[in-house]
Amino acid sequence: SLLRAPAQHIPGYNYDESKIAPYTLLDPLRLSNGAPVTTAKQWTTERRPEILHLFEENVFGVTPPAALHAVAHARVVEHNDHALDGLAVREQIDLTFESAPGITPPAEALHNLRILLYLPAAAVAAHRPIPIVLGLNFTGNQSVVDDPGILPTPLWSKPKGSSTLLHELPADSTRGTATQQWQVRMLLTHGYGLATIYYGDLEADFKDAAQYSVRNLYSTPVQLAAPNAWGAVGAWAWGLSRALDSLLVDPRIDPNHIAVTGHSRLGKAADWAAAQDPRFDALLSTESGHGGQSIQRRALGETVYHLEHSFPYWFCPNYAKWVGHDSEIPADGNLLVSLMAPRPLYVASAQGDEWSDPKGEFLSALSASRVYTLLGKPALPPNAQPPAIDHPIGLDGFVAYHERTGKHDVTDFDWENYILFLDNLWGKQTPA
Ligand code: GTR
């Protein structure tokens, strides 16, 4: 099923470092005309836009201007001052999107996004500005913590052997099933709020489900077929920015301390959201892998072929050009994470997730660190080596990395270190 972690070791793919064909990393500090980038201004005005454009044209597609100017109506549908035994203020907010002028979306197109927001009750009472972690969830808002007050919204599924997509309210038994992956109580007790949205509110994660996507509110079918049209990752990333719009106008929230997080395909969405939208103040990305933070030209584990074969709708049509040409892709993971600079970046890997190539993710963090250094922020030193398992590095700077024990997943270890990293940068929050 969709919720199952991918096979840890799929035969037919290379997992042997010694069998990687010689490769040269793309250089975040060299313009495509070959000129070196030596000043912060050159980075910001020349190289950064160039890299963003490479990702729009080759990987994720262009988020259309009409979508960036989306009109949304916000409505608080639920509010509770004593959620989670008094630990939290809980709020559930609906954003309803209008389609762009001149566009008539199919009747089935989605246009409602439900934000679940938890704020530490003590910080709200003390009027302290609250830092927030925002992320897309796989299994519905009701799954992130065992809280009967969470209003469930319909989830997408496709029963085995059927070709019909279902969009149905989840069973009560699914409440809190992703507690480990979200660690809501840990965040709250450390003074952080959590905002989360269900990715299926934006686009169903299935082949041939494009008619339901919010993309239809801003792009015509002809526009969606363009070689550089946005795909599902673009839609999910866009949704993160719309949730951010609503967090930024909430007077309880610290507008300068909003981190975005995501795991795996939703890590790719978080990477792409943070790359495009400088209002995200930090990126905490767990195992976003190939098409995310891994180095595609290493082709260790997942390949463009696999991504394009299984999930063509995640990317722009142009991405198919790189099938079998992993080593030539002009927009690679190290360039994607460099777009975070100079904002805090945490790259998290897992030892049992060879499919996403932990070393490739490390090399991306290391390569992007050069940009942070140019911009005057402490990051990984050029001679840094992949750290020992379960030993994060860079927690005292702007670029951190770890490879933890365990499989493709999000664990309390990931969250403990995300919190340490943010505490070091943003100041330790008063405990709840
Ligand atoms: C896998 C995909 C990975 C990753 C993962 C996930 O099947 O190959 O790139 O995104 O799904 O989202 O769990």
Image (cartoon, rainbow, N blue to C red):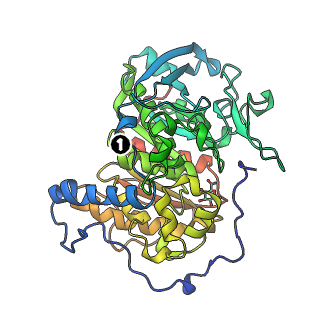
In the rendered image, residue 241, in percent from the top left (x then y), is placed at: 42, 36
Q: Is residue 257 above or below residue 98?
A: below
The image quarter in which residue 333 lies: bottom left
> Foreground: 413 or 210?
210
Left or right, 37 with respect to 197, comes to: left
In the rendered image, residue 68, in percent from the top left (x then y), is placed at: 36, 36
Q: Residue at x 63, y 64 (%)?
A: 309
The residue wearing badge 1 is 277
> Foreground: 377 or 267?
267
Near mark 1 (Cα within 10 A), the count class, few <14, some 14-19 or many ≥20, is some
Query: How many labels were placed on the picture?
Result: 1
In the rendered image, residue 58, in percent from the top left (x then y), is placed at: 42, 62
The image quarter in which residue 130 lies: top left
Left or right, 260 with respect to 90, comes to: left
> Foreground: 387 or 55?
55
Q: Secondary structure at mark 1?
A: loop
Residue most extreme to the right: 161
Q: Quadrant of ligand 1?
A: bottom right
In the rendered image, residue 179, in percent from the top left (x then y), is placed at: 67, 37
Q: What residue type is disc 1 on? A: Asp
Left or right, 185 with respect to 176, comes to: left
